[in-house]
Image (cartoon, rainbow, N blue to C red):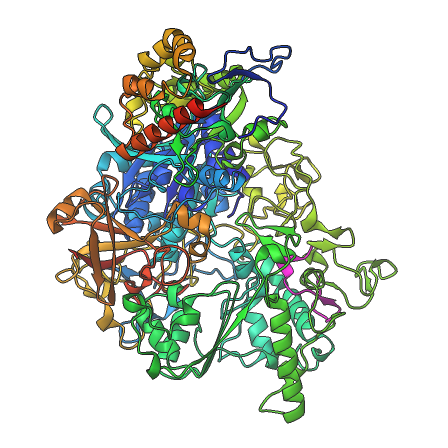
Amino acid sequence: MTNHWVDIRNADVILIMGGNAAEAHPCGFKWVTEAKAHNKAHLMVVDPRFNRSASVADMYAPIRSGSDLVFLGAVINYLLTNDKIHHEYVLNYTDFSFVVREDFAFDDGIFSGYNPEKRTYDKASWDYELGHDGYVVTDPTLQHPRCVYQWLKKHYAGYTPEKVESICGTPKAKFLHVCEKLASTAQAGRAATILYALGWTHHSTGAQILRTGAMVQLLLGNIGIAGGGMNALRGHSNIQGLTDLGILSASLPGYLTMPGQAEQDYSKYIAARTQMPLRPGQMSYWQNYPKFHVSLMKSWWGPAATAENNWAYDYLPKLDKQYDMLQIFDLMHQGKVNGYIAQGFNPLAALSNKDRVRSGLSKLKFLVVMDPLATETSEFWKNHGEYNDVDTASIQTEVFRLPTTCFAEEEGSVVSSSRVLQWHWKAAEPPGEAKTDIYIMSQLHLRLKALYKAKGGKFPDPIVNLWWPYAEAEEPRPEEIAKEFNGRALVQLNDPKDPTKVIRKAGEQLGGFGELRDDGSTQSGCWIWTGCWTTAGNQMARRDNSDPTGIGNTLNWAWAWPANRRVLYNRASCDVAGKPFNPHRKLIGWNGSAWTGADVPDIGATLGPDTGTGPFIMNPEGVARFFARKGMNEGPFPTHYEPFDTPLGYNPMHPKNPKATSSPAARVLPGIWDTFGKAEEFPHVGTTYRLTEHFHYWTKHSLLNAITQPEQFVEISESLAESVGVKTGEMVKVSSKRGYIKAVALVTKRIKPMQIEGKTVQHVGIPIHWGFKGLTKPGFLANTLTPFVGDGNSFTPEFKTFLVKVEKV
Amino acid sequence: MSSLQSLDIKRRSATTTPSPSARSAHAGEVAKLIDVSKCIGCKACQTACMEWNDLRDEVGTVAAGVYDNPTDLSAQSWTVMRFSEYENEASGNLEWLIRKDGCMHCEDPGCLKACPSPGAIVQYANGIVDFQEENCIGCGYCVTGCPFDVPRISKKDNKAYKCTLCSDRVAVGMEPACVKTCPTGAIMFGTKEAMKDQAEERILDLKERGFDQAGLYDPAGVGGTHVMYVLHHADKPSLYHGLPDSPKISPFVGLWKGVAKPLAMAALGAAAVGSLFHYITKGPNDVSKELEDEMEAKDREAQANQETAP
């Protein structure tokens, strides 16, 4: 979230799209209720189904799954055409006036630089035009035909209310209602928030869909203000923490990035990431990349990371390609992966295309499952009848099940969607032989280290030199690890301006990431978390919920990254002179000598408005981007592409260009094209989702949850039920190109047939929570149906849109 | 659940001795307010109810083809969510009306009036209506007497169960478990007056949002209730999964209470009139044949016991 849960109550308009906050985030949803009850907020829900969020909304608009980008593109077009934009904001805080390179082009769905064989782009032309001074050329009059504003108008001109009606199936009046309500927040003093989740990310164009949402918010001046923002509602309680710590294969902690194969040279790796300002006076915060990187290397390898060995740069793997889950399981499928550790992960149920995942697991020599529960993955080899119909004798994989503790059986921190790190204490003893993840991983590490020490190996250094400075090597304490993430001074730190002044004594915890250095004198395991455990103690354990300004920021409740800031980009809540756009919901303001207010300023505390420093300090241009430059793989401006299982078979925005039917830059692994369905065979649009009563595949193991939602079902419209001859409560078979499931039909008025491009499209709603383990009635894993393809940037599988066929059993 | 607590009792079933009245509920009578317009049907209240009251219903099925689960109130499910899909012709909008069902804690409780077993049903001075299962004879008259079809007879011990409004929690100054857990604040608890004030504010908001008929459900036919609803369509309560439009206690329960009971008590003894009473009051809420037979058997047994008593 750019903002935070409590801040939703400050919104005047709330759009829930690409998520179902009431269903999946009932506790956080209280702030939506609060905004409605005490801020007269208007709540709108756009979703293929009339869901639990819609049940308490002021307006619900249906949309065909996978067409969100057309809808949002048309909102952009509406705001530009009707001039419902926050002028001061877009002119000063975005790249509206920036001029784009002359060779940048967009032709019928494809951007310049496309290589159709490789399905990738040469992104050279995707950039601003630079002047002789090295800065971007701008035109503050916005008249330059190649300025971002003019490009934006041109790019979205075709995204009209009529197209929305035809492609998304959203009635024009409902679409215009959404536009008008959002437009009402283009003025200072009103705010709209967008709440989204997997309903946007689970598409082959997911990252671009949510970029489009962010663009809408930028046009309205809703980023950086109270009650505004782009708010990703995270699913697992600590999935934000996972992202922050860079557990994804191409990431390092704190959104630092892994080197690629071409980056064997440390100085080149660092130079490419140390971004210099693209406009005068900008902070370009990634200039500090070396400090964060070196402090991380010192954290991992301690004394072994030295200036002489480029801070152990050679210890880092250099990626030849992405190793996301789809890639790993494809390699497994090819027999190129021998062993796999599934730690708190149930890939048989959670990754797309179950049968393919199972065939991969069957080729492993060994599989280790670390989990508090007996997951489906740990029994992928066992025949569970129709639910998991395998020939056990033909599977040679050896499976080890290591029971782990649950969150309540250990202490530690959890990062919420609000970016708040909150400490929790152990509440119960773990049952049986369950061990903490820290214990198991430490044992594994110590044994591997001993083996490498005893027997050597190709390159033992990264393992044998891994710094392990814990009191109890067998099981480091969570607080030791938390303090290490925060970081400390490794030697005495003196003030560079006044060397007689000592800033930190050796060994002292650091107060913030501003203290990190690139000379090996500091250590921090995750720079954005520096400040969470300082000399003042564990900041995450703070429990003071006082809210002196009444805006809900509670700066003394736990601790938020970065720097305990609760609303990101909050400099943008003030005008150019530093005066809050909305004095009634002031986050910060310039008092003549400093930024002060209810939040930690997202700009140098004494960096005055006269410096012209922009609010988007992480971007080298200091402003937010409508034009993504080289940041995205599909192109700098989001464009609609059909899902890979498309009910249309062509891109209605670019009907004559088959190259632009589905995302031209999404990676389709070898052999996968044949696993996509065609509308002739599978005429209905399937979409998967969660129910309030359950959490993923965990709570089916819990009796209370099993009682409240006991058995698998699929939701279909009354007309689809009639056409396949089923009544509510009867069994149906739902098939895709990848497999089938059987479930009880729940016939509902909440799903309606849609007219898309002149043809009727029916949605089939498939809740995901059932499987062949647990206390609920046994069911089929929903991912049996879903395609083995993901977003072109994040590689998140397309769980939300795929083709199916419904039949009566 | 148990009378061994600090709440004062103002009414008891089938009892002629006066109830204690030296103390009174100084804080006023209590009420739970369920704001249907804020409810997202998450079933946290159901779960909290199961946890606090040590209830575990069967893991059922979804054969009914709805989100309602468990599908009905039972001796193990004292509250369930009811989901109704309503196509509002006036606005052209679909509405998904979600109502938390359970005991309404009537000010004039039909169950208590109908109950022939002394002290099996009580009403506390704060308005909560509670079953004292140790005194329950399992006759099922409370089921018949209830205008909301709430009490359920347990197959395990043949006694009647329903929501206690967490009288055990309320007695020590805590809110009911469902109120504490409700994530959206759709369930509120306080004095009846405070809850009415709260409802006023919510109704105003709903009217501003176009629900002209928004209102409070506190039906006069049962003397008002200690569980009230804020409804978007207060003119049509039955839209909410058959919430009675104007609930009343069956006139036969009134007759039984007012005239027949003292006479009958004198003439026959409490248990013996059971079957007669049951016969004349058997109204819209059918008791199953099985249950009826069982009840009659119990009546005969009770009569026999009385006849053979020394």
Tell me residue B98's x, y (percent).
35, 33
Tell me residue A205's x, y (percent).
33, 58
Q: Name the foreground residue: B150 vs A237.
A: B150
Q: Could you tell me if residue A602 is visible in this image? A: yes
Q: Tell me: A161 left or right of A223.
A: left
Above or below A25: residue B81: above
Magenta includes A534? no
Tell me residue A30's x, y (percent).
49, 36
Helix, strand or loop for the magenta stretch, by majority: loop
Q: Name the foreground residue: A481 vs A570.
A: A481
Above or below A269: residue A770: above
Question: Residue placed at 17% from the left, 63% from the top?
Answer: A678
Q: Name the foreground residue: A24 vs B45.
A: B45
Question: Residue placed at 43% from the left, 39% from the top?
Answer: B76
Q: Could you tell me if residue A283 is visible in this image? A: no
The total number of labels drawn is 0
Q: Name the foreground residue: A576 vs A527.
A: A527
Tell me residue A474's x, y (percent).
70, 73
Question: Residue placed at 40% from the left, 47% from the top?
Answer: A707
On the rendered image, what quadrant is the C terminus of chain A found in?
A: bottom left
Q: Quadrant of residue A105?
A: bottom left
Above or below B119: residue A44: below
Q: Tell me: A486 left or right of B74.
A: right
Above or below A235: residue B199: above
Provide the residue span drawn in magenta: A516-531
Question: Residue placed at 34% from the left, 27% from the top?
Answer: B149
Q: Residue furthest bottom?
A: A455
